[in-house]
Image (cartoon, rainbow, N blue to C red):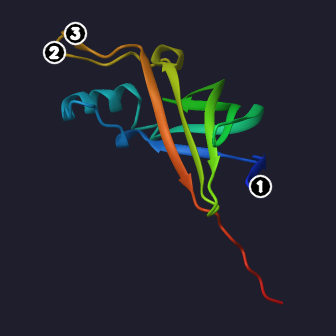
Amino acid sequence: MNCEGQMIKEIKSFYLEIPVKSLKSTEGSSMMDDKVYSALKSTSNQNIIFQFEKINSMSPNGNGWDVNVQGTFAIAGVSLRDNMNVHATLEPDGTITFIGSKKIRMKDFNVEPPKAFLGALTTGNEVVISFNINLAKNLIISSK
């Protein structure tokens, strides 16, 4: 990422991996968690991946920028290109925060929504992936 002062000028690359087994149900049900891990094929596809490709648009908003990016999501062994909206903030100390969410449909990734108790308990087809990523500025100092 290239920044000039408090302005984000360019995002060269961004790659995010989320371990499938780090996902936890809001009810704390280990049985349902195991069913989700199975549906997401966690044995052969251990991570949910987002690979940034390009910025579609970036505009100032409040204390940062609204950024629409294009990238590829890889879930359960299926990769799909899609757009995502992210709010980026560059703090005076150099910390950069990205906040966003993306609604996905499990069936788009050939994932059958998990069921339990002979279908009495099911999850919906739509899942929202929400994130809040804080990056500290990495300074490289060289001496000659």
Circle 2: element type: loop
Q: Amino acid at mark 1?
A: Cys
Which mark's residue is nearer the viewer, 1 or 2? 1
Front residue of 43 and 49: 49
Q: Amino acid at mark 3?
A: Gly
Q: Residues within 10 Å of mark 1 (few under 14, many from 20)?
A: few
Point out residue 124 in the picture as x, y percentages from the top left corner: 36, 14
On screen, residue 18 above or below 125:
below
Q: Amino acid at mark 2?
A: Phe
Front residue of 21 and 144: 144
Query: How far apart are the alpha carbons under marks 1 and 2?
Result: 52 Å
Which mark's residue is nearer the viewer, 3 or 1? 1
**Residue 52 appears in which quarter of the rendering?**
top right
Q: Are marks 3 and 2 in contact (CB under 8 Å)?
A: yes
Point out residue 106 in the picture as x, y percentages from the top left corner: 46, 18
**Residue 69 appears in which quarter of the rendering?**
top right
Q: Report the disc number at residue 3.
A: 1
Q: Residues within 10 Å of mark 3 (few under 14, many from 20)?
A: few
Q: Residue at x 72, y 47 (%)?
A: 13
On screen, residue 77 above or below 2:
above
Circle 3: element type: loop
In this figure, which residue is indicated by the disc labeled 3?
A: 119
Point out residue 144 in the picture as x, y percentages from the top left corner: 84, 90
Q: Report the disc number at residue 117.
A: 2
How many marks the image carries: the answer is 3
